[in-house]
Image (tube, rainbow, N blue to C red):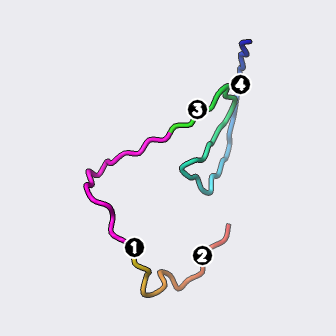
């Protein structure tokens, strides 16, 4: 069965607070969403990153705004 969908979508304002590696953001209709993951070494790095040390002092003395 073939299903043809014609849509007109008008978005005046959209806010995305966060998006992760496995997130899907979709506007409109999709018959199939195929998962895809691509990792690129665009910096040409050849070694793993060094271990992260905890900070010695807080990064900020001010409260973060809450939206």
Residue that mark 2 sits on: 64
Q: Position of residue 32 (x, y in %)?
A: 64, 28
Q: Nearer the viewer, mark 1 or mark 4?
A: 1
> Residue 50 lies in what quarter of the image?
bottom left
Image: 37 above or below 1 = below
Residue that mark 3 sits on: 34
Taking 17 as reference, is 8 left or right? Answer: right
Q: Is residue 18 magenta?
A: no
Closer to the chain start, of discs 1 and 4, is 4
Label 2, residues with CA under 10 Å away: few <14, some 14-19, many ≥20: few
Element type at mark 2:
loop
Q: Are marks 1 and 3 in contact (CB under 8 Å)?
A: no
Residue that mark 1 sits on: 52
Q: Position of residue 2 (x, y in %)?
A: 71, 13
Closer to the chain start, of discs 3 and 2, is 3
Q: Position of residue 56 (x, y in %)?
A: 42, 87
How far apart, in angstroms, are the residues tagged by discs 4 and 2?
A: 40 Å
The residue lying at 37 percent from left, 45 percent from top is 40
Magenta-highlighted residues? 37-51
């Amino acid at each position: 069965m073939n299903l043809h969908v014609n849509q007109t979508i008008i978005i005046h304002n959209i806010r995305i607070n966060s998006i992760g590696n496995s997130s899907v953001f979709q506007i409109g209709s999709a018959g199939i969403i195929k998962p895809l993951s691509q990792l690129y070494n665009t910096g040409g790095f050849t070694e793993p990153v060094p271990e992260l040390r905890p900070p010695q002092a807080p990064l900020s003395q001010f409260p973060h705004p809450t939206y």
